[in-house]
Image: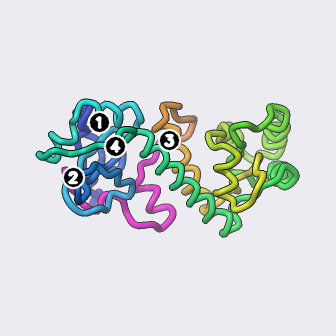
Amino acid sequence: MPKHIPERTCLVTREARPQGELLRFALGPENEVVPDLKGNLPGRGAWVTPTAEAVAQAARRRLFSRAFKTEARAPDDLAGLVDALLVRDLQGALALAVKAGAATTGFGKVEAACLKGEVRALVHAREAAPDGRRKLAAALRKGARGPIWQSPPFDDLSGAELDVAFGREGVIHAALLAGAGSEGCVIRWRRLRRYRGLGDDAEPKRDIDQVNDTVGAERAGQALDE
């Protein structure tokens, strides 16, 4: 029997979508709007299309009060808060990938992994120089065993943000290695890019329920409310 996928309606667009494709917000003890990325905070939920623009609109138009049927106070920069939480979630996934041996850093190590065909995706600090990017892209194409090199590199985080994720200083170039250990990072990275309005790339979109299935984390949307 096909698995039932519950749907929720976006506060802004009024479009019904599978709940794993939306961002959930809960109401805190002082009626503050709280982002609920994992979808497991107690109480009634409000659902928004996972883009910064949609979150900002929901706050500006006071749609959370309508959804929660009470005065709901959204932070001044709710969209920015969600962005920061998505970055933190990605950093946590990268840290786990490092512990699992599914990521490597340093130009030489990354280049060697590229030439061996071991790389799932390249990672560059936002400020990385074009020359280093070009050289690693060439190594990735040279060592590719399939279409994996067509996936563009991830360069949405600063060097300082990558330092936190990888637990070391001076991270400019890194690589996610092919295998299950890096898949959660790739999915979270795509989620962050879609949120920022940067679009998706060649691979199919996957929702947060699939993210949590992949990494063995707690399933999103345990509170199936609207």
The answer to which of marks 1 and 3 sits earlier in the sequence is: 1
| Residue beneath disc 3 | 204
Q: Quadrant of residue 103?
A: bottom right
| Residue beneath disc 2 | 31
The answer to which of marks 2 and 4 sits earlier in the sequence is: 2
Position of the N terminus, as image quadrant, is: bottom left
Q: Residue at x 62, y 58 (%)?
A: 94
Q: Quadrant of residue 176?
A: bottom right
Q: Are marks 4 and 1 in contact (CB under 8 Å)?
A: yes
The answer to which of marks 2 and 1 sits earlier in the sequence is: 2
Residue 65 among those drawn in magenta:
no
Which label lies toward us, 1 or 3? Answer: 1
Say left or right for 147 vs 43.
right
Q: Are marks 2 and 1 in contact (CB under 8 Å)?
A: no
Image spot of residue 153 (x, y percent): 68, 40
| Residue beneath disc 4 | 75
Measure the C-alpha gap from mark 1 to mark 3.
30 Å
